[in-house]
Amino acid sequence: MNTRTPTPGMVRLTHLIYALHAFAVFSALLGSATIILSFVASLPSLAAIVLNYWNRGAVRDTWLDSHFSWQIRTFWWTLAWIVIATVLVFTLIGIPFALAAFVIVSAWVVYRVVRGWWRLADGQPMPEKTD
């Protein structure tokens, strides 16, 4: 329940967190890393997830809490899919599925960063229970 109004500083911090995730995705597009590996293993994204957990209490009971949950869930689901795809690579038959998972999850990460940041810019919370 959103009972409190977030401080302007917390809104700016949430923008910064989306910017860090977006930078990780963008740098992967320009570099040699994959989007999902850059999203979970690059310094900008690791800093973003630390900021999420460090400041979660400050946004509790505000509409920003939904953005923090969205960002945290995106990070952990991406990491889970990396583990699953990595396991699939070790089986000859699983390689095409692993490659498909990397492509699909990469597109999903881009979608999550863009959609979340867009809703934040509009002052909107993220819908509940949407993964």
Image: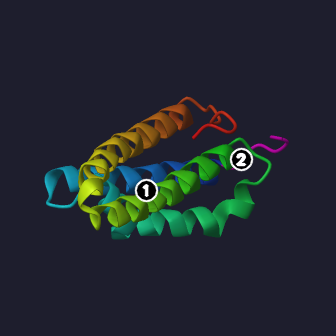
State which quarter of the image contains the N terminus: top right
Residue drawn 71% across and 47% down? 6
Q: Residues within 10 Å of mark 2 (few under 14, many from 20)?
A: some
Residue 41 seen in this snapshot: yes
Nearest to the observer: residue 114 or residue 10: 114
Q: Pointer 1: what residue? A: 81
How many numbered circles are shown? Answer: 2
The x and y percentages for residue 93 are 26, 55
The reply, left or right, for residue 43 in relation to residue 68 is: left
State which quarter of the image contains the C terminus: top right
Q: Is residue 68 above or below residue 87?
A: above
Which amino acid type is shown beneath numbered disc 2? Answer: Pro
Residue drawn 15% across and 58% down? 31
The reply, left or right, for residue 128 in relation to residue 39 is: right
**Which of the 4 image quarters holds residue 126?**
top right
The x and y percentages for residue 84 are 42, 60
The x and y percentages for residue 130 are 61, 37
Q: Earlier in the sequence, mark 1 or mark 2?
A: 2
Magenta segment boundaries in residue numbering: 1-7
Q: Pointer 2: what residue? A: 6
Nearest to the observer: residue 131 or residue 96: 96
The reply, left or right, for residue 130 in relation to residue 88 is: right
Residue drawn 47% across and 34% down? 115
Residue drawn 30% across and 53% down? 98
The x and y percentages for residue 114 are 41, 37
Q: Is residue 5 above or below residue 20?
A: above
Nearest to the observer: residue 115 or residue 63: 115
SS under mark 2: loop
| Dot label at residue 42 | none
- Does residue 88 belong to the magenta stretch? no
